[in-house]
Image (cartoon, rainbow, N blue to C red):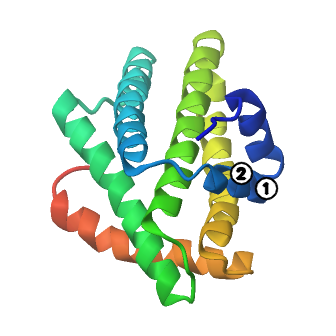
Amino acid sequence: MTIPPLGPLASLTLRKPAEAARQILALNPGREVLWLAFFLAVVLNCIAQMGLDLSIAASGGPTVSQSIPVVLIRSAGTMLFSILAFLYVGRFLGGTGRFEDLMILTIWLQFLQIAALVATLALSLIAAAFMAPLILATAIYSLYITLHFLNEAHKLGSLGKSFGVILLSALLAVPIVLILNPLGPV
């Protein structure tokens, strides 16, 4: 397996997410590499989330204190549940994606989201007013990329079906999140 340069791949993901998805899927790494990347993404996400929490607390915003193990478990669980929901809902809607396909695309998107969050945090040190709009823009653009990634992984042939996968997966996720975390913030 040859890893392409990450900078151009990130740029391609932002410009042409479907083409980037095809290149990422062609990597076809082994399960060990996928799980290592998965846990690296979980740890980096935890660090970024704690940085965001500290940044919000420093600016006088509401604070939510959570221990590192709780944040790690929640991050890993959310990411794994997303992969499984996208897999089974996508198959329900006629997709043919494999677990490994959805895992590698989700991990890559997670790394990009972490980079965007770190950039947002750095920019918010200069101008705190940019934090909320940049986080919202990242979420919207991540949705756009996810539509293309799901379409490529499942070979759905339609961004509308990809949106259906996201919508049905979210409908499955809300009750499970509420069951697992009934007293905490959603």
State yes or no: discs 2 and 1 in contact (Cβ < 8 Å). yes
Q: Amino acid at mark 2?
A: Gln
* Label at residue 19: 1
Which residue occupies the foreground of this view, 95 or 100? Answer: 100
Query: Where residue 96 appears, x then y in whole percent?
Result: 55, 80
Residue ID for mark 2: 23
Q: CA distance from mark 2 to mark 1?
A: 6 Å
Mark 2: secondary structure = helix
* Label at residue 1: none
Q: Residue at x 41, y 28 (%)?
A: 44
Horizontal side, residue 167 vs residue 11: left or right:
left
Which residue occupies the foreground of this view, 177 or 81? Answer: 81
The extreme top residue here reads 126
Please identify the quadrant where the N terminus is shown. top right
Image quadrant in which you'd find residue 70: top left
2 vs 1, front mark? 2
Dot 1: within a 10 Å radius of its alpha carbon, few (fewer than 14), some, or many (20 or more) residues? some
Query: Where residue 74 appears, x then y in whole percent?
Result: 26, 46
Mark 1: secondary structure = helix
